[in-house]
Image (cartoon, grey):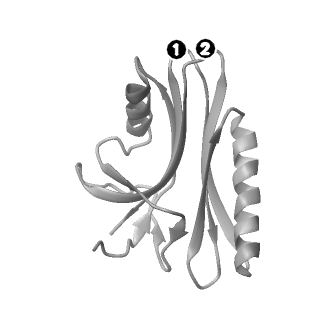
Amino acid sequence: MLPTPKKFFLTAASAEGQSELTAFDNALLAGRIGNINLIRVSSILPPGAEYDPDLSIPPGSLVPTAYGYIISDEPGELIAAAVGIGFSADTFGVIMEFAGKCSQKEAEERIEAMLREAFASRGMELVDMKIAATEHRVEKIGCALAAVPMWY
């Protein structure tokens, strides 16, 4: 059983690759999470977790991460990915992820709307939010990725 994470950061990055997998890997590297093992988690930020934008995670670590990504091999296509965290005053946060064929601005707007809905559905007050997003115009094979890695 993994301990409850105590720290987190948001990242969003885009990249090209010679294959879908290398485009994804290059986006992970650009987002500072390419040398860790992501454990995909659903979307709850633990109570009291601290935002640390300079967080350094040891290579090879197993890291709970909420993330969204899109890969495209259509030259000229615009793709985007975004993550956002909604914060309550005194309890857990909610993370939302989005990736699609749209602009960065549209992805950010989708995240904000999803966070507002998530808090309304829980009957919680949304007091703040953080959003990270990226867009990418595909050259050959591109990936847009956004993530919230959480660490101990």
Spatial separation of the CA atoms under disc 2 and disc 1:
5 Å
Taking the spot 39% from the left edge, 29% from the top edge, the residue there is: 21
Q: Is residue 32 left or right of residue 11?
A: left
Residue 126 can be seen in this image: no
The residue depicted at 45 percent of the width and 34 percent of the height is: 27
The three-letter amino acid code for the residue at tag 1 is Lys
Query: Do residues under tags 2 and 1 come within 8 Å of each other at their CB atoms?
Result: yes
Figure check: 32 above or below 90: above
Label 2 packing within 10 angstroms: few (<14), some (14-19), many (20+): few
Image x and y of residue 30, in percent:
43, 36
* Image x and y of residue 101, in percent: 68, 32
Residue toward you, 52 or 76: 76
Mark 1, other Cα within 10 Å: few <14 / some 14–19 / many ≥20: some
The residue type indicated by label 2 comes to: Pro
Tell me which corner region of the image, top left, top right, bottom left or bottom right, holds residue 92.
Answer: bottom right
In the shown orientation, is residue 26 left or right of residue 104? left
Element marked by disc 2: loop
Indicate the position of residue 82 as horizontal and vertical percent values. 61, 46
Comparing 79 with 10, the one in front is 79
Q: Secondary structure at mark 1?
A: loop
Residue under label 1: 140
Residue at 73%, 79% in the rendered image: 125
Quadrant occupied by the N terminus? bottom left
Q: Is residue 133 above or below residue 44?
A: above
Image point 51% across, 37% down: which residue? Answer: 13
Towards the viewer: 22 or 88: 22
Instruction: Return the residue at label 2.
Output: 75
